[in-house]
Every structure is written in structure tokens, then in C-alpha cells.
Image: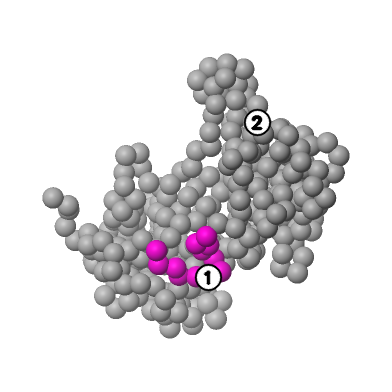
Amino acid sequence: MNRISDSRIVGRPLLDRCHADRNDDKANRARWDDPAAQLLLIDPYDKVVMAHDRVVAVPTEGERDDQHDLLLGVVDGVPWFTRRTNEPRPEARSVRAVDLVPVDRELVMSAVAALAWHESNPLCPRCGQSTRVTSGGPARVCPQGHYVFPRTDPAIITAVLDDEDRIVLARQRSWEPHRRSVLAGFVETGEPAEHAVVREVAEETTLTITSACYIGSQAWPFPRSLMFGYVARATGTIDVGHDELAEASFLSRQEVSDQVNAGRLQLPPTLSIARALIDAWLEHRLPEPESGFDLSAPLR
């Protein structure tokens, strides 16, 4: 797999999710009672407390509430749990707007995704009865013994380039006037991710994708997306005369740099794969789209 950033896309997991015994009550009690164990608190607005560019957690204390204190896993021998707080914390910062070191990113993304999923799935989809969190927190179960597992919404996010190596940056209608990002959209039912790249780019800009190369993925738990990143080559003329986007255009590296420096262009937050794609393009670190899939004609 092509790695576009050592700091934003993690190739090897740093969080051991304890698959072998994460639903073992005894093992989880031992993890909670470990003197080194940490509890990551997430406020109602998905904010966390940070200090010196690191996430701040608190020690686990007292009895664990297994319906609210969710096991995340173990990092370098240290057990990590997470809990949603009821009150906002003035000193907390939005996880969308901060840059996190890889291990903190895994912990925070996992925490936010797990909490959001549990909070939105109180009932069993098969029988309608109330569900409870399983011991380790990776699933829910109802009195009938039906297990409910988390669902992830797949999406594609694409750095679209033209023959001059310019990038498409676009603005959604709900965004601030200067905010721009690369093109993205959800994968539809029964649709391969590569097809979604072609379809979404055509729907949003009328451009035709001729080649694409897969880069990497990122969990984006707002509330439960998994972003598949691509770099792609496109032909045609941009047209946003519909409801998808407010505006979009091809920009050169110099134009992006000049507009950012002048305050006329706001790029995505550094936490996101969107920013990783743009930064990699700016620094000539993206692979050529032609090194991946040729999408100029349908497969036979």
C-alpha cells in the first residue's frame, strides 16, 4: 500500500483490541483494576482534553460500569477505556480540529465511534427489545440472545487531478466561504469503492475519471464512516450547476499556497485523510493515478 504520510495514516495498529478475551469479565476486571489503566473521557460534543499536544486521560477508579465504561484495548501494556461525560468541559477541544499523534488518533477515533454507535442502537433490530452492552463493549445483546454488531458506512475520498497535475478543491453549500476540500461521497449498496469514485466525481463535477490509485483508509467516526482514499486522473470541464456543491475548481500548487497564505483558502483539519491527500499532493508525494486502475473503459 502506498503511504502518503507517516503521521496521519497508520499502517500498523498500535491499539490491541483484545479480541481473544475482550468479553471475559475476569480479564476486563483485571484491566480496569490495573494501576496503569486509563479512562478517556469524551464530552457530549466529541471533545477531549489535551495538554502538550497529547490526549489527557484519567486513571480508572472504583467499580467499572460496564454499560458506560467501554474497553478500547491495550497500548504497550496499558489498558484503555472510554466514557461519555454528561457535561461539556470548557477546556476540551474538538477532535475534528486537533492534530493527534498516531496512538492518540487510534484511541480517540475508536472511542468516538464506539460511543456514538452504542448511543444510537438501544433496541434490537430483530425483535425490538432493549439491548445491553456486552462485557468488552464491541457489541450489544438483547434478552432473546440476538447480538447486534457495529456498522460502518463506507465512503470514498479522492484527490482528483487533471493532466497538468492540478487538484480539484470544492466547497459544499453548508461550508464557510473559504473552506475547500477534495471530493468525497458514500459508497452505495452493492457498489465497489472504485465505482463510487467514478460515480461521485461525475455527479459532483461532471468530470470523467480515467485512472485511480488506492492510497489508504481512515476511520471518520462522525458518526461511523470509513474513508477509502484515492488519487485519480480526470478529463472534462467542471460543472457544479446542481445541488451537490457550491463551487469547485482545478488549482495548481502555487495557487493553493498563495490562497492559503492570503487567508482566502481554508484547508481541511490536519486530522483528516482529506488534508493528508492535499498535503501529499502539495509535496509531490502522491503516486501517479496511472499506477493504479485504468478506468477509461468498463471491465469486460
Amino acid marked by disc 2: Val
Q: Is residue 13 visible?
A: yes
Residue 263: x percent and y percent? 56, 76
Q: Is residue 51 placed above or below 82 in the rendered structure?
A: below
Residue 38: x percent and y percent? 76, 51
Q: Are marks 1 and 2 in contact (CB under 8 Å)?
A: no
* Quadrant of the rendered image containing residue 205: bottom left
Left or right of 56? Residue 224 is left
The secondary structure type at the circle numbered 2 is strand
Q: Is residue 96 visible?
A: no
Left or right of 177? Residue 286 is left
Q: Is residue 72 placed above or below 206 in the rendered structure?
A: above
- Image point (46%, 53%), residue name: 227
Mark-to-mark CA distance, 1 and 2:
35 Å
Residue 183: x percent and y percent? 40, 60
What is the chief secondary structure element of the magenta stretch? loop
Q: Which span is picked out in magenta?
A: 1-12
Picture disc at residue 6: 1
User: Which of the two residues, 22 or 226, is positioned nearer the viewer here?
Assistant: 22
Give the mark, 1 or 2, whose residue is nearer the N terminus: 1
- Image point (58%, 33%), residue name: 139
Residue under circle 2? 133
Number of other residues with Cα within 10 Å of mark 1, as a class: few under 14, some 14 to 19, many 20 or more: few
The quarter of the image holding the N terminus is bottom left
Does the stretch in magenta take in 9?
yes
Residue 201: x percent and y percent? 32, 57
Most extreme residue toward the right is 62
- Image point (64%, 39%), residue name: 22
* Quadrant of the rendered image containing residue 250: bottom left
- Image point (42%, 55%), residue name: 228
User: Which of the two residues, 201 or 173, is positioned nearer the viewer here?
Assistant: 201
Left or right of 237? Residue 38 is right
